Amino acid sequence: MVRVGYGQVDTLAGWMAHEYFDLEPLQRDDFSRRFERLHAWHRREQLPEYARFLAEAKIRAQRGMAADDLLWLVDGMKSRYAVIAARAAPDAAELLAGLSPAQIDHLRREFDRMNQKFLKENRSQESVAARRQHQQRNALKQIRDWVGSLSDSQETRLIALLQQLPLTDLLRHEDRLRRQREFLALLETRHIERAAYPERVRDWLVNWERNRPPGLARSFEDSWKRRAELYAAVDKMLTPEQRTHLTHRLQDYIDDFRYLATLKTATARND
C-alpha cells in the first residue's frame, strides 16, 4: 500500500488542493507542475534518508524502546516534516499569492466543514466516556497493527494504562483552529511586500508549534511525554513473537522506501 499510495500522492495532493481552494484550471495545472517537482525531489533525496532513520528505529525496537526512544522517534518525524515544508515554501507562496477573495472564502467554508468532521469523528461533543472509549479503541488498533494480536491480559493492562492518559481531541481541535486563524491571517498579507511573503509562508509551515499559547504548549508536551511512557510500558509487555512482528513491520517500511527511491532512479536513467 505504501508503494501504491506513494505513486498516487500527486493525484491526491491535487485533489485536496482543489477541494480546499476551488482552483481554476490554470491554477490546478500550475499546482501539479510544482508538486511533481517536489515529489521527484522527495523521492530522490528524502526516501533513502527515511530508510536510514527507520533502520535506527528498528535497532532500538530490537533492544527494547524506552520513553526517550519514543520521543526521539517523534522528534525525528517532526524534523523530517520541517525539511519538506522548507522545500515546498517558495512554490506554496507563489500559489497562495494568486488566490482570489472568493477562493479564500471557499477555504473558510472548507475549514468549517472539516472542523465539524473532526469533532464528529473524535466524539468530541459527546460524553467524556464516549471520547475516552474512542481514544482507547484507536490506540489499541494502532498497537495491534504494529505488534500483532494481543492477549486478554495484555489488553486489560493496556486499557488500564490508557485510562490514565489525558484526552487530546479538544486540545487538537483548539490547535487546529489556531493554525487556521494564522493561515487566514497569512493569506491576507499575500499582496503586501511580495518579496517577503515566501519567508512568511516558510516560517508558518516550518515553525508550526511555535505560536501555541503557553498553556496549550504545556498540555501538548505533557501529552507526548505520557504517551511515550505508555508505549515504553507496552514495549515491556511484548512477547518475542510480538517484537518480531514490530521489527518486521519496520523492515517492510524500510524496504518500501528503498524500493521507491531505486525505482525512480532507474526510471530517470531510462529516460
Image (cartoon, rainbow, N blue to C red):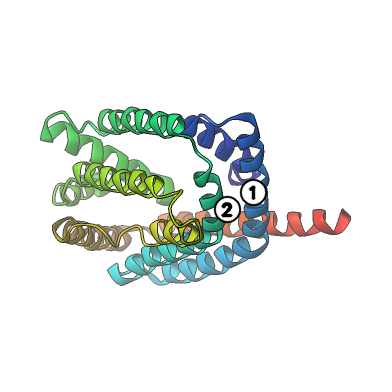
Judging by the rendered image, the residue that carries numbered circle 1 is: 34
Q: Are marks 1 and 2 in contact (CB under 8 Å)?
A: yes
Q: Residue 250 in the image: x percent, y percent? A: 51, 58
Q: Which mark is residue 91?
A: 2
Q: Residue 174 in the image: x percent, y percent? A: 22, 44
The disc, 1 or 2, on the residue closer to the chain's N-terminal end is 1
Q: Quadrant of the N terminus?
A: top right
Q: CA distance from mark 1 to mark 2?
A: 7 Å
Dot 1 alpha-carbon crowd within 10 angstroms: few under 14, some 14 to 19, many 20 or more: some
* Depth check, front residue: 180 or 170: 180
- The residue under the point 59% across, 30% down is 24
- The residue under the point 48% across, 33% down is 21
- In this rendering, the answer to whether 185 lies above or below 64 is above
Q: Is residue 25 left or right of residue 240?
A: right
**In the picture, residue 125 is in which quadrant?**
top left
**In the picture, residue 242 is in which quadrant?**
bottom left
State the SS at label 2.
helix
Q: Residue 3 in the image: x percent, y percent? A: 64, 46
* Depth check, front residue: 18 or 247: 18
Amino acid type shown at disc 1: Arg
Q: Which mark is residue 202?
A: none
Q: Residue 113 in the image: x percent, y percent? A: 34, 27
**In the picture, residue 145 is in which quadrant?**
top left
